[in-house]
Amino acid sequence: MVAIGAKVSYLKIGDPVCALVTGGGYAQYCLASEAICLPIPKNISFTEAAGLPETFFTVWSNVFDRAKLVSNEWLLVHGGSSGIGITAIQLAKAFAAKVVITAGSEKKCQFCINMGADAAINYNTQDFVETIKQLTHNQGVDVILDMVGGDYFPRNLSCLAFDGRLVQIALQKGDKSTINLLPIMLKRLTITGSTLRARDDDFKAAIANKLRKHVWPLLEAGTIKPVTHSTFALTEAMQAHQLMESSQHIGKIILTV
């Protein structure tokens, strides 16, 4: 932190912080509200810390606040080897939930198992709906965190247990889908979704406070950790995006200045 505003109360110049910014993060300097700045945990580098806010705010808000995942429930995460996915695995396991993920290769599946996932499904070789039924003895999962959308939507409904919750946070396969509404009624399902960018600082500050209380101690203890696949100089942002679009990475891609 190199400068502070007149109303800043608890941070001071020189404090190492990471923050969820609304935009303008591809820069040497950017503005952030004090309320959504978090201290960089001990033993976490500045580079690693750059990958914390977006993923941890997103996962906490959607998996724990919206979907209300609790211990011993099953969480299905699509895209388990992404930054969001790896964060979701670690947080869910830290709070004693069971996790199954989908990913596009055996290498990614094994990585997620190593990160703590109870099961991993290669969506290129396995039908995740049938595999979920086998894993859960036909009960289904309690919560699904989905970044895919499109034709995954009706398949997700088939995977949910009674009183299950589906949280939609991205639409990689499109925003249109045809579904049968009857299972929603019969299984008492909850379908929700969110985006963080449009929410105000008060909403984001509430998440920051929960992360500071419940998650930052786990980071400082090394119980959970950020996973960085690779770093690029700010001038190489195009190459970073090309890597991201190739889906060859595991974890976060970080721009450095």
Image: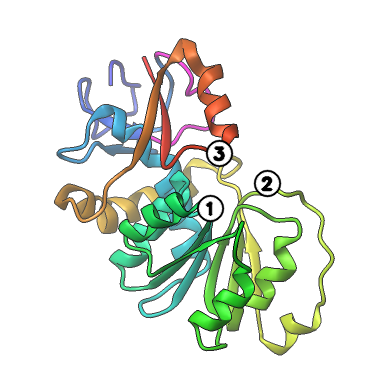
Q: Give the CA separation, mark 1 to mark 3.
A: 10 Å
Q: Quadrant of the C terminus?
A: top left
- Image coordinates of residue 231 in percent, x first then y, are 38, 24
The magenta region covers 19-28
For label 1, the SS is loop
Q: Are marks 2 and 1 in contact (CB under 8 Å)?
A: yes
Q: Nearer the viewer, mark 2 or mark 3?
A: 3
Compared across the picture, whether 237 is left or right of 42 comes to right
Q: Residue furthest top?
A: 235
User: Quick check: is 22 in the magenta stretch?
Assistant: yes
Q: Residues within 10 Å of mark 3 (few under 14, many from 20)?
A: few
Q: Is residue 242 above or below residue 116?
A: above
Q: Are marks 2 and 3 in contact (CB under 8 Å)?
A: no
What type is the residue that disc 3 sits on?
Ser
Q: Secondary structure at mark 3?
A: loop
Which numbered disc, 1 or 3, marks the residue that appears first in the sequence?
A: 1
In the image, what residue occupies the spot 62% across and 77% down?
130
Query: In this orientation, does residue 64 appear?
Result: yes
